[in-house]
Amino acid sequence: MKAICGIIVFLLSVSSLSAQNKQRMASVINTDNLKKNLYILAGAEMEGRETGTRGQAKAAGFIADYYKQIGLAPGNNGNYFQNYPLIKDSVEYSVIKVNGQEFKYHADFTFPLTLNKQEKVTASEVIWGGYGITDSSFNNLAGIDAKGKILLVLSGEPGTHRPSRWSNFSAGAKLRAVAAAKAGARAVFIIDSTFSTAQNKFAGSISIRPAEESGTTKAVTNVYIISKAIAKVITGDQYEHLIQKADQVAPVDFHKTLSISVVQLMHHESLQSSNVLAYLPGTDKKEELLIVSAHYDHLGIREGKIYFGADDNASGTASVLELARIFTKAKAEGKGPRRSILFLNVSGEEEGLWGSDYYTSHPVYPLSSTVADLNTDMIGRVDTLHTPLDSNYIYIIGDNKLSSALRPINENNNNTFTKLKLDYKYNDPSDPEKIYYRSDHYNFAKNNIPIVFFFDGINKDYHKFTDTPDLINYGLMTKRLKLVFYDAWDIANREEMLVVDRHEK
């Protein structure tokens, strides 16, 4: 009995000591460090950190140098970088002809270069498809025979004050291209009422894409955003009628025989981008791995303006750097994690989760022994749904999708230490923003790796050049980061590996 009591006392003392270590290390998280690194990452020298550019390479170099400075080992077999290939596409020439009338690229139409693969498209018939939306609640293409035809649709979506992905220029174009491919269309022409906005969105004739297409990439057909001038030549006196009736689920019956051809001549150049990886080996469970991730890329320079990307996502990147410093310090003091930790900074998120897709397709450490991914993407601001007086919150996404153990860990740490309001709004599968699918954790979740995504919501400067470091709430960012740290500490040191026992979307 005395022996049993002694064991119990010993285990309790070990647990108490671990909790004390956790709290003490959390207190070392330094707001000034976060601010310093965020200002560097979101500074003018980084030129907006667009994937495949000089600015992104500079940011990658800074991150790697920081890891080296704090004594953290390279995460890719002696290399801090995991390079992945890109292709730079540029338009040399493109023209649309409708019954012999010629329309010029950029002046009359534009397109997302990453989607269009065919250099020549011809058709002799056009069919109207409303908004071209195909989802469970609104399907314009049901019953429409678009095979071999040009599918003519309208941009945006009907009657909503909360736009979904269908209203986003890039995402909406791809969704319609996928839908058109399924319907057998030769191409999809999207009429955009604000064509000048589309011109600016797809400004220039250069785009970058991964050299390796994802295994989950869906087949798409060529997509073109066209001006009202082209649309009127195609539809004639039916144009206004079609636009007025576009909100109907079943589109107005319109099809027309005419000659349409599209030619696009492209030039392709090989480039590369990099994920930045640093590795902290564990102790008795070092074969198991926790990933702490954030994307460090942003939108670069557009129309002469630097898109600084302070919240999106210098905040998450600076957070990963600070967590790396804290865990490295803990290990140096003999309090290192039982499981190994990979600090993973990925690029290509803004273009389509490229870097995390490449890592999960070419993992440096086995995905089978990767226990979880904690992803920070925007944790430094207050969104438009909250006020400065109601800022003590963080959105938690994906924590209950794959493992029933993650939410209790996160909620217990929050209730005990940080006392933030945990908001699960974006964890709801029915939420129109579909945030769960829009950051790098999703590529791990697709591979049955439990995840938690920490997110501050959409603020008024989201994806604008006004997302600057002076607008970050550094005290709030520090508090949110402490919750990430507590979760990372517990997952890295718990006795049992997280079990995948749920499969929610």
Image (cartoon, helix red, strand yellow):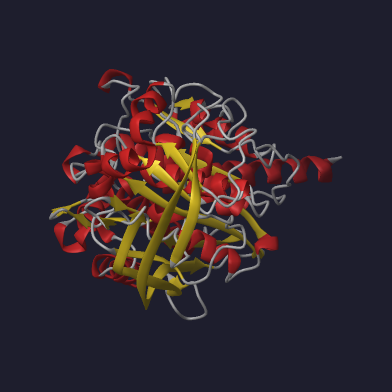
Using the rendered image of the protein, determine whether residue 492 is visible from the camera's viewpoint. Answer: no
Rendered residue at 59%/33% (across/down): 135
- Residue most toward the bottom? 78
In this rendering, the answer to whether 343 lies above or below 157 is below
Q: Nearer the viewer, residue 396 or 158?
A: 158
Rendered residue at 31%/69% (across/down): 90
The N terminus - image quarter:
top right
Residue 105 in the image: state x and y as whole percent: 27, 58
Picture quadrant where residue 263 is located: bottom left
Q: Nearer the viewer, residue 49 or 67?
A: 49
The C terminus - image quarter:
top right
Residue 43 in the image: state x and y as whole percent: 17, 56
Count every numbered label the image shows and give the total. Answer: 0
Residue 250 in the image: state x and y as whole percent: 56, 25
Using the rendered image of the protein, determine whether residue 127 is visible from the camera's viewpoint. Answer: yes
- Residue most toward the left? 304
In this rendering, the answer to whether 27 lies above or below 143 is below
In this rendering, the answer to whether 49 lies above or below 151 is below
Left or right: 284 with respect to 240? right
- Residue most toward the right? 1
Residue 251 in the image: state x and y as whole percent: 52, 27
In this rendering, the answer to whether 362 lies above or below 251 is below
